Amino acid sequence: MNRIQKPEIIVTRAVPDAVAKALTDHFSVSLNLNDIPFSERELKQALESADGLICTVSDQITADIISSTERRASIISNFGVGVSNIDVNCCQKLGLVVTNTPNVLTHATAEIALFLILAVSRRTTYSETKLRNNCWKGFSIVEDLGVSLAGKTLGIVGMGRIGQATAEKVINSLGMKVVFFNRSPVKDLSFRAVQLDTLAEVLTCADVVSIHAPGGTKEPILKREHFAMMKKTAFLINTARGDVVDQRALINALKTSLISGAGLDVYLDEPKVPNELFLLDNVTLLPHIGSATCETREAMGMLAVNNLKAHFFDGNYPSRII
């Protein structure tokens, strides 16, 4: 009796042990144990040599890669909630299934947004650097002052699951008021928040602006003219995608004090970060760790595996994009 051949899956980055085991239970798997990112050529070869691919938001799956006449893969299972790293339109035209891992990273990302809000408003990065460099001279009444957030206004851009989780945490822990802009009406919130009609209205009244909109758009959501609308005392938080903000305009706004500071977990051309950001003391920078908890990364991986199982075995996708 012939054994049924398992679908072949290539994984572009290292994954938690439990996820690797779940994959090997159902598929013939090539794991990336050294965790070195694939080149464009390696990504193309992966789609040509395997039945399916698990990739991450750092893998740029372009039309050129997808359109290979030798492509064998019929599914890209993205390890991330967003799919701005994949040319989804090209996939749709060619009948290539794309899935993602939403919902399971909501609270982990919201926690990082909350951390960044506190860090930039209390200037903790600047203060810690001062301490580590042995430049602290002791307690002072007038030095190293931040601002209090109680009673201030948080402006959310994109009131999806992560935006809602961030708003609720900020209301409950910091006592802030919340306004938001969303492309469609948002109803039945479990907390008090006011939806405004335009992005400009949110930017002009918010003391902290936190972006939770998906990336992959042709133009950034926040451009040079938007920073001019914000309060000079305002802070920008971005835990969404690097391309939702005009990075050059943001740097200029920070250098010229158009806004007071920023907390960033994502960047335009990751893992590259402009050196100008490192030189600014009014910015807190994190290396894209919004979903980086053991529990969340394992849950994301299991969801990616379940999408593959659905594709090859039962068709019941937990989270299919196209």
Image (cartoon, grey):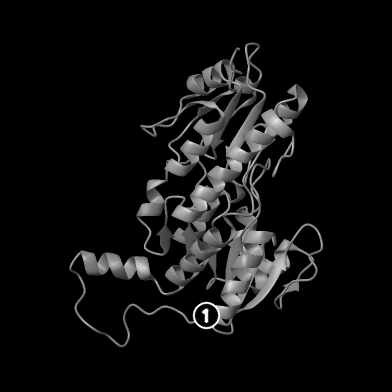
Quadrant into which the N terminus falls: top right
Can residue 16 be seen here? The reply is: no
State which quarter of the image contains the C terminus. top right
Q: Please, what is the three-letter code of the amino acid marked with disc 1?
A: Leu
Q: Position of residue 272 (x, y in %)?
A: 42, 41
Q: Please, is residue 217 above or below residue 158 in the view?
A: above
Q: Seen in the image, is 131 located left or right of residue 144?
A: left
Which one is in front, 39 or 197? 39
Question: x%, y% of residue 61?
Answer: 59, 29
The image quarter containing residue 91 is top right
Q: Nearer the viewer, residue 41 or 5?
A: 5
| Coordinates of residue 60 in the picture (x, y in percent) | 55, 32
Q: Residue at x 46, y 27 (%)?
A: 38
Relative to 50, does residue 247 appear above or below in the rendering? below
Residue that appears at 41% across and 64% down: 282
Q: Residue at x 48, y 57 (%)?
A: 264
- In this rendering, does residue 14 appear at all? yes
Name the residue that disc number 1 marks.
149
Asked if residue 284 lies left or right of residue 306, the reply is: left
Q: Residue furthest front?
A: 1
Q: Residues within 10 Å of mark 1 (few under 14, many from 20)?
A: some
How far across and how far down the image is residue 124, in percent? 36, 70
Residue 100 lies left or right of residue 196; in this view the side is left
Query: Please, is residue 144 above or below residue 59 in the view?
Result: below
**Taking 282 as reference, is 163 left or right?**
right
